């Protein structure tokens, strides 16, 4: 019983930290290049789970992740319905079997936004407050 309570409390505290972080992580949004007008939330979720590898026009998608765990968790939950750990496990299996390449990890919103703005097939995520006219947010 004590182990169950400890496990429950650990999960509960983690959830509180993630969801009570206010604007820092609650406003994570996917971004695509302005030229990509067909991207939608469902397709982006499938790209990040490995269920899809390309956009509706057949062009290969280039994925970017942020290095921050809380941001990644918020994005994964919102766009894939899965935890960041589950998504990571999916990518480890894909790499091991030769079926995929995981998203490139970048250190900052500015780095992700810059890469996405340069490549019409790129997708990433940033804090919503950092979205500007150089990219398109997909909610």
Image (cartoon, helix red, strand yellow):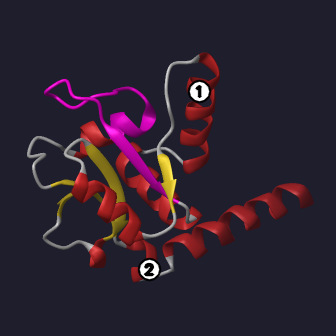
Of 42 and 56, the residue lying toward us: 56
Q: For this view, does 105 lie left or right of residue 29?
A: right
Residue 29, by quadrant, is bottom left
The C terminus lies in quadrant: bottom left
Helix, strand or loop status at disc 1: helix
Say whether residue 4 is magenta. no
Instruction: Please give the residue where the numbered disc 2 appears in the rendered image.
Output: 24
**Of the numbered discs in the image, which one, if any, rests on residue 69?**
none
Residue 135, by quadrant, is bottom left
Question: x, y percentage for residue 64?
Answer: 41, 50
Could you tell me which residue is drawn at 44 percent across and 35 percent down?
49
Q: For this view, does 116 lie left or right of residue 70?
A: left
Span highlighted in magenta in the image? 45-66
Could you tell me which residue is drawn at 10 percent across and 49 percent down?
35
Helix, strand or loop status at disc 2: helix
Earlier residue among tags 1 and 2: 2
Circle nearer the viewer, 1 or 2 = 1
Could you tell me which residue is drawn at 34 percent across and 27 percent down?
53
Residue 12, by quadrant, is bottom right
Q: For this view, does 1 lie left or right of residue 42?
A: right
Mark 1 neighbour class, 10 Å CA radius: few under 14, some 14 to 19, many 20 or more: few
The N terminus lies in quadrant: bottom right
Of 1 and 104, the residue lying toward us: 104
Q: For this view, does 90 lie left or right of residue 43?
A: right
Question: x, y percentage for residue 30?
Answer: 30, 56
Question: x, y percentage for residue 100?
Answer: 49, 26
Instruction: Please give the residue where the numbered disc 1 appears in the rendered image.
Output: 95
Q: Does residue 93 lie above or below 44 as drawn?
A: above
């Amino acid at each position: 019983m004590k182990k169950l309570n400890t496990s429950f409390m650990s999960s509960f505290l983690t959830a509180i930290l993630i969801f009570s972080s206010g604007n820092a992580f609650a406003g994570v949004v996917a971004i695509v290049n302005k030229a990509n007008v067909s991207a939608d939330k469902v397709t982006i979720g499938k790209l990040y789970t490995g269920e899809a590898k390309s956009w509706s026009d057949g062009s290969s998608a280039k994925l970017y992740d942020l290095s921050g765990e809380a941001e990644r968790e918020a994005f994964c939950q919102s766009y894939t319905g899965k935890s960041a750990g589950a998504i990571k496990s999916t990518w480890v299996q894909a790499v091991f079997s030769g079926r995929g390449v995981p998203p490139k990890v970048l250190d900052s919103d500015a780095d992700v936004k810059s890469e996405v703005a340069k490549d019409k097939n790129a997708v990433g995520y940033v804090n919503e407050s950092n979205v500007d006219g150089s990219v398109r947010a997909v909610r």
